[in-house]
Amino acid sequence: MGSWTPTTYKTRNWAEYNLSLKQRGSLAIWFDPEMVWDAAPSGRRGRQQAYCDAA
């Protein structure tokens, strides 16, 4: 009896393989623009604040 070896696969379509790897880590998040509101300017330095009810 011989030892068991796992099946190895050869990639033949590299363009499709690379595209699938890119899409594997893709995460699409959609935000409704009506959910975000901007705070009134405070006159202080720093980034303008935007708030969302979904958070």
Image (tube, rainbow, N blue to C red):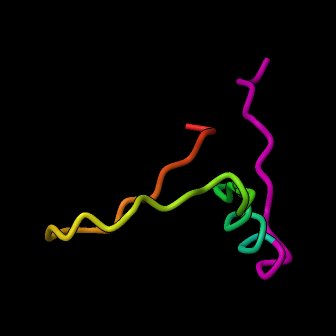
Tell me the quadrant of the picture where the N terminus can be found: top right
Say whether residue 51 is left or right of residue 10: left
Where residue 28 appears, x then y in whole percent? 72, 58
Residue 54: x and y, percent?
Answer: 63, 39
State the residue at coordinates (75%, 24%): 2
The answer to whether one can see residue 43 in this image is yes
Q: Is residue 20 above or below residue 25?
A: below
The residue depicted at 68 percent of the width and 52 percent of the height is: 35
Q: Quadrant of residue 12?
A: bottom right
Which is nearer the eye, 25 or 44? 44
Instruction: Tell me where residue 21 sits by quadrant.
Output: bottom right
Residue drawn at point x = 14 percent, y = 71 percent:
45
Classify residue 16 by image quadrant. bottom right
Residue at the extreme top: 1
- Is residue 52 within the magenta segment? no
Secondary structure that dominates the magenta span? loop
User: Where are the magenta residues, as a range?
Assistant: 1-16
Q: Nearer the viewer, residue 29 or 18?
A: 29
- Quarter of the image for the C terminus: give it: top right
Closer-to-camera residue (16/41): 41
Location of residue 44 in the rendering, given as x and y in whole percent from the top left corner: 15, 67
Number of marks in the rendered image: 0
User: How far from the left and from the top, in percent, is residue 37?
Assistant: 56, 57
Is residue 24 something that shows in the picture?
no
The relative height of residue 46 versus residue 51 in the rendered view (above or below) is: below
